[in-house]
Amino acid sequence: MSTNERRVGTVSRGIRCPIIREGDDLATIVTESVLLAAESEGFELRDRDVISVTESIVARSQGNYASVDDIAADVRQKLGGGTVGVIFPILSRNRFAICLKGIAMGAKKIVLMLSYPSDEVGNELVSLDKIDEAGVNPYSDVLTLERYRELFGENRHEFTGVDYVEYYGNLIREAGAECEIIFANRPTAILDYTDTVLTCDIHTRARTKRILKAAGAKAVLGLDDILTESVNGSGCNSRYGLLGSNKSTEDKIKLFPKECRDLVLNIQKMIFDRCGKHVEVMVYGDGAFKDPKGKIWELADPVVSPAFTDGLIGTPNELKLKYLADNDFKDLSGDALKEAISASIKAKSDNLVGNMASQGTTPRQLTDLIGSLCDLTSGSGDKGTPVVLVQGYFDNYTN
């Protein structure tokens, strides 16, 4: 083996940064933080390294915030201020509770329709075993709150200890609205209660809107239709509205970042100007992975990455080394095996779809894969590394 051969593949590093405030020059701060980390830790940037910036500091630097009063004003103006069906929300104090508070402030009555046995991202209201035991068909049966309690009693979330049915009901009433809670999975079930609907699902929202409109609903909006423009000087998101928002204070949310393509291009240019390396840059939020124990799908943002440089467009194009070793070159070993596999990699086509030697590789968007890696690296707590540097991601066995 050559003494100068690379012995390390992909490396993901959390980069510490100062606390970001509204109006900060984020491109300069990110660039300086990455270069200082490289100097401190004794590594060098390379072409095709990926610098990833968490969406929260992007939105914070943009000052992209809104209050519950702003949400209420927009809901009242767009949905009339009467009875509103709020359907398919996720069960989250951080992600949805404060939005619900604003929504309820903008309506006279909320008919809250919860999907069951779990929400869209896997937060469980009641176990499937209990559903089976009760003889309930979640695809067709509509349960009132009374029937739900009769069958299943109180169910607290495994991780948070919150009974979301009680919590959301109290929150709506405290916001000044009447509240009725039902449980159903067919979007059209809400039309027996009201023809004015705010659908709060994330990844299935287009289908839900289509079904409701086809069934004759008078007004149908999604969370992505609320705060698409500034209300009374608030922040906004023209593309995603309230989707991707997080709780900031008890009365304020931080929205998903506004357009930030310029940010990633600026960081890319600054790095090139400083050290002559062509890096890729992306903004990332939630990763796209699922917890096997809690069964929670992490992706509560509308997308993993709202902005990225052009080199991150597409999916991996990889061969499966173990397939080559076990099949094409099963009679080889040592240097002969290494050389044969290296030759296969160098000769691979730009599109391996259908090639047996690529089976088992992950044909997901590069930004979804790298964003998941970055989300796991930075965490959501007190690590203080809102920027992640990924090196060697585009390497292969021949590098």
Image (spheres, rainbow, N blue to C red):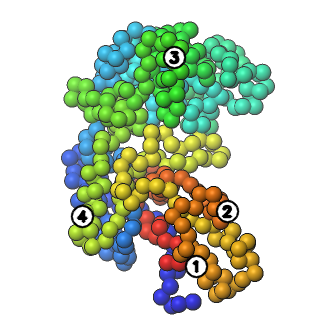
Q: Residues within 10 Å of mark 2 (few under 14, many from 20)?
A: few
Which of the two discs, 1 and 4, labels the residue nearer the N terminus?
4
Residue under pointer 3: 214
Front: mark 2 or 4 = 2
Residue at 42 percent across and 22 percent down: it is 221
Against 110, residue 62 (above or below) is below
Q: Give the crowd class for mark 1: few <14, some 14-19, many >=20 residues within 10 Å.
A: few
Which residue occupies 53% across, 75% down?
A: 346
* Rendering coords of residue 27 (x, y %): 25, 56
Determine contact: label 2, label 4, CB under 8 Å. no
Helix, strand, or loop for circle 4?
helix
| Nearest to the observer: residue 294 or residue 250 | 294
Is residue 136 among the parts visible in the rendering?
A: yes
Q: Quadrant of the N terminus?
A: bottom right
Q: Can you say whether 236 is above or below 210 in the image? A: below
Of the two numbered discs 2 and 3 on the same chain, state the one appearing first in sequence.
3
Real-space Cα separation, disc 3 to disc 1, in angstroms: 56 Å
Query: How many marks on residues?
Result: 4
Question: SS for tag 2?
Answer: helix
Which residue is painted at 40% across and 30% down in the image? 224
Quickly name the residue at label 4: 270
Which residue is under mark 1?
Answer: 343
Q: CA distance from mark 1 to mark 4?
A: 36 Å
- Label 3 close to label 4 by CB (< 8 Å): no
Q: Which residue is mark 2?
A: 356
C-alpha span from label 2 to label 1: 17 Å
